[in-house]
Amino acid sequence: MNEHDAWPDPAVLVEWEQTAVAMARLAGAEIVNALGRTLTVRYKTFVGEDAPPRYRDPVSEVDHNVESLIRKRVADQFPSHDILGEEMDEPSREAATVWAIDPVDGTSNFINGFPLFAASIAVLHQGVPVVGAIWCSATHALRAGIYHAHAGSPLKFEGEAMAMRENPSIRRRLAGTPYLAGIHEAGWDFRKTGSAAIECAFVAAGLLEVANFARPNVWDVAAGVCLVQASGLAASVRDGDAWNDFRGFGSPPPRVWGRPLILGSAKAIQTLRQGL
């Protein structure tokens, strides 16, 4: 049996999870230390000289520095693993195990001082998210912290297992999606935070009942998918005109993925599909 056929045993998954949590904590510390500084910011895309500039996809010095630190740590600890990161486009070695890194998710929020942003670390094996750790600037505990899990484990927050509790007196839950007129009577109020990773973590933690993402990158949602599944919830992806259960990103995971994705309870996912 070669590395591509073998599934990681529980002890290996625990080790990967502990490492992902440590990396997420490192990223969170770097983000917090940068608050209040005048940051160097560049933009990945804008319209050329014949049209007014339209600046999109900001990248701060913190994004680059954090990803560099995490890449070094992965290379030192797991030299046979590959890395898929938002800020550095490096050739894939097509390893069975790939770390998907988003050093600052919600960079527009971060550089503007809007306090909703995250750092997301995932481990994919054969394209399937098996470990997720998301440092969030805001959490259910009203403080920054890390949601984390590995395949087969429950969702945890800062090392403690979480149990989702619903208040039956709440008639309208929250959905992480823009307002959808076609399902306005579904019993939801609508929210978007500007951070896909935070919304994934909030679905896992039960703060959002459901969330959808129109064209996510692997590093945006990989950790979140693991957390949501650890909570006993579902993930649904659109293949052409059909919605199917999420099975993975492909092996090796592509740099450009961008397929519509919904996370939440099976019932909520079915309802939300009708408005998309």
Image (cartoon, rainbow, N blue to C red):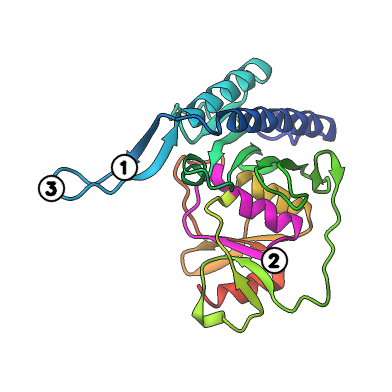
- Report, in whole angstroms, how far the alpha carbon at label 1 lies from the one at label 3: 15 Å
Q: Where is the N terminus found, in terms of image quarters?
A: top right
Which residue sits at x=50%, y=80%? 181
Q: Amino acid at mark 3?
A: Asp
Q: Nearer the viewer, residue 102 or 198?
A: 198
Q: Amino acid at mark 2?
A: Glu
Comes first in the chain, label 1 or label 3: 1
Residue under label 2, please give it.
Answer: 209
Q: Residues within 10 Å of mark 2 (few under 14, many from 20)?
A: many
Q: Position of residue 25 (x, y in %)?
A: 69, 31
- Determine whether 4 is above or below 262 in the image: above
Residue 96 appears anywhere in the view: no
Q: Nearer the viewer, residue 273 or 180?
A: 180
Comes first in the chain, label 2 or label 3: 3
Name the quadrant containing residue 96: top right
- Report, in whole angstroms, how far the alpha carbon at label 2 lies from the one at label 1: 33 Å
Residue 235 included in the magenta stretch of the image: no
Comes first in the chain, label 2 or label 1: 1
Q: Answer yes or no: do the residues labelled 1 and 3 have beta carbons within 8 Å? A: no
Which residue sits at x=51%, y=82%? 182
Residue 5 appears anywhere in the view: yes
- Determine whether 124 is above or below 231 in the image: above
- Determine whether 135 is above or below 229 in the image: above
Q: Residues within 10 Å of mark 1 (few under 14, many from 20)?
A: few
Left or right of 265, for residue 175: left
Q: Position of residue 125 (x, y in %)?
A: 66, 37
Residue placed furthest toward the front: 36
Q: Residues within 10 Å of mark 3 (few under 14, many from 20)?
A: few
Span shown in magenta: 197-220
